[in-house]
Amino acid sequence: MNTNKKLKVKDIFTVVLLALINVVIFFASSLLYATPVTIMLMPVFFSLLEGIVFFMIGTKVRKPGAMMLYAVVRGILGGYLPYVLLYFLSGIVSELILRKSGYGSAKGLTISYILCQLCAALGSTIYPYVIAAKSMADMAVTDGRQENIDAASRMLLSGGWIALLAGVVITAFFGAMIGKRVVKKHLEAVGMEG
């Protein structure tokens, strides 16, 4: 492999800093997990917003390993094992897609972003509120969130998980389009080709 195709320290620093922006968005918005409806809508909300950072990484760091590094940072800082594992899976799949489509490819980045957001929704909402809802509610007894968790679980189990995943796909597509447009304008503003 050509040495200028390998991640350099500058690239690693760029990916980690940009990934941390999405982590800050996630933690700042986690206050919205206050009601059952907002629990279900959070992955949709994130899918719309996080595309800008994802496209910035994919466009500025067009090298193998950049998306895997992003996925590792996002997963580990999520701190919940199913979320971590699914983010790692999304990083592997993204790398395979970008290897085939070309690093920096808008089509490859769009598909990768949608899959990444689906994995994040599965790990952050579907698994804890559907598969592990009982243990989540038992842990939440002490902080008063048990009713919200039970209600969100009932909504998801009654077919809400299908609507949630469909919503994530749709908003992730729009998030990717927003990310693509913002990054293109940014690169034009600084005099670089997109």
Image (cartoon, helix red, strand yellow):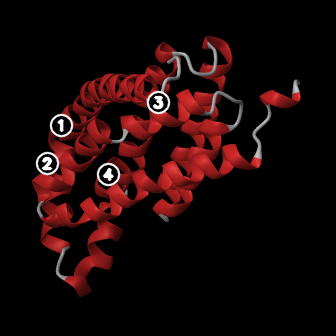
* Front: mark 4 or 2: 4
Relative image position of residue 93 (x, y in whole percent)? 60, 29
* Residue kind at label 3, given as amino acid type: Val
Q: Answer left or right for 105 relative to 99.
A: left
Q: Which class describes the residues within 10 Å of circle 4: few (<14), some (14-19), or many (20+)? A: many
Name, please, the residue furthest toward the bottom.
142
Circle 4 — which element? helix
Question: Which residue position is annotated with label 2?
Answer: 155
Question: Which residue position is annotated with label 1?
Answer: 159
> What number is the disc on residue 125?
4
* Residue kind at label 2, given as amino acid type: Met
Q: Which class describes the residues within 10 Å of circle 2: few (<14), some (14-19), or many (20+)? A: some
* Residue kind at label 1, given as amino acid type: Gly
Relative to 119, say whether 145 is above or below: below
Question: Which residue position is annotated with label 3?
Answer: 190
* Front: mark 2 or 3: 3
Q: Nearer the viewer, residue 173 or 40?
A: 173
